[in-house]
Image (tube, rainbow, N blue to C red):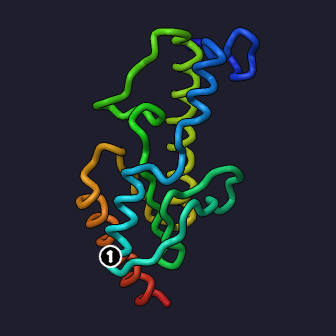
Amino acid sequence: MSQSVPMTSPSMKPSSLGVSARMRRQGRRYTTPEVTVRRLLFAAGLRYRLQRRVPGMSRRTIDIAFPGPRVAVFLDGCFWHGCPEHATSPKANAEWWRTKLDKNMARDSETTSHLKAEGWTVLRFWEHEDPKVVADEVAAAVRVSRRGNAHSG
């Protein structure tokens, strides 16, 4: 098994200042797929919280959270989160990128496991998925969770 190199290693840095600046400007919040799904959820009468901190995990947030029924929704970008259909591997500085993207995927998995252990329903969708289908699945999960919470309390 190969040993991973820390992200802060001097040999492990973005290929250029231009690439680094461009990546920092990439939107992390309020992406078009996320906004579209939120509008559909709101139109369906669902109310939610945005960029809610993951309980017990600093510096991690839930894209769309339903705290009462404990439903966490993540809309993951294909490049940053390793979509099996659309992920690409940059050629320049390939080792640095592979390490970074692998850490993103590991963090996603850890966050999902943590939330599930805390009693949350976790829904992860890719940015390319149909927003209407995503919103319908989220709405269904919220309804199921609300029914379950009503019977347990």
Position of 66 compared to 140: left or right?
right
Instruction: Establish if 103 lies above or below 132.
Output: above
Asked whether 148 or 70 is in front, the reply is 70
**Residue 144 seen:** no
**Residue 152 seen:** yes
* Position in image of residue 92 (x %, y %): 51, 9
Position of 4 compared to 129: left or right?
right
Q: Secondary structure at mark 1?
A: helix
Instruction: Establish if 108 lies above or below 99.
Output: below
- Taking the spot 54% from the left edge, 58% from the top edge, the residue there is 62
* Mark 1 lies on residue: 43
Picture quarter with the N terminus: top right
- Taking the spot 56% from the left edge, 10% from the top edge, the residue there is 93
The quarter of the displayed image where residue 117 is located: bottom right
- Taking the spot 67% from the left edge, 16% from the top edge, the residue there is 13
- Amino acid type of disc 1? Ala
* Position in image of residue 4 (x %, y %): 63, 17
* Position in image of residue 81 (x %, y %): 46, 36
Position of 78 compared to 57: left or right?
left
- Taking the spot 50% from the left edge, 51% from the top edge, the residue there is 112
* Position in image of residue 45 (x %, y %): 35, 81
Crowd rating for badge 1 (residues with CA inside 10 Å; few <14, some 14–19, many 20+) = few
Position of 9 compared to 111: left or right?
right
